[in-house]
Image: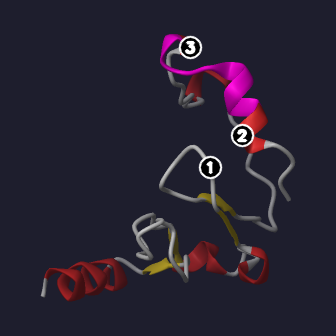
Amino acid sequence: GEVREFKASMTALDLTQVIQGPTHTGGNTLDLVFVSGQCLSDLDTENIVIAPLSWSDHSLLCLDFLTAVPHRREADQTIWYRPRRLMEPERFQTELGPFP
């Protein structure tokens, strides 16, 4: 089916899906993390954490890479953000709490 084709496409691109286990409250692995073959050895696969969140039906994925990120110029950085008006910062921090 479609899942098999998708996995075959990722394998053909030398990408490995590293999340093993459900990432959604429905018991499915919906959140995927693909790592290229050349970087797979840099990932600490023994310490991947899938942590449930009380405010989402998806889990928080925590991954540790064993190599430093190469230096990049400030202008080249990609910054992801969510507009502040779309979240409650205090609640977000409380919900995150301490995590590994």
Residue at the image position 57 percent from the left and 43 percent from the top: 55
Give percent across and percent down for residue 77. 60, 30
* Label annotation for residue 95: 2
- Type of residue at label 3? Arg
User: Is tag 3's residue or tag 1's residue first in the polypeptide sequence?
Assistant: 1
Give the magenta range.
85-93
Which corner quadrant of the image does residue 7 belong to?
bottom left
Q: How far, Cα to Cα, is label 1 from label 2?
A: 7 Å
Q: Residue at x 14, y 80 (%)?
A: 2
Q: Secondary structure at mark 2?
A: helix
Task: From the image, tell me which residue sits under label 3.
Answer: 84
Label 1 Cα crowd, 10 Å radius (few <14 / some 14-19 / many 20+)? few
Residue type pointed to by label 1: Ser
- For label 3, the SS is helix
Taking the image as shown, residue 2 lies to the left or right of residue 75, namely: left
Residue at the image point whose x is 44% and y is 76% from the top: 27
Residue 41 in the image: x percent, y percent?
70, 81
The earlier-in-sequence mark between 1 and 2 is 1
- Look at the image and say whether residue 44 sits in the magenta stretch: no
Residue 25 to residue 60: above or below: below
Image height of 55 relative to 13, above or below: above
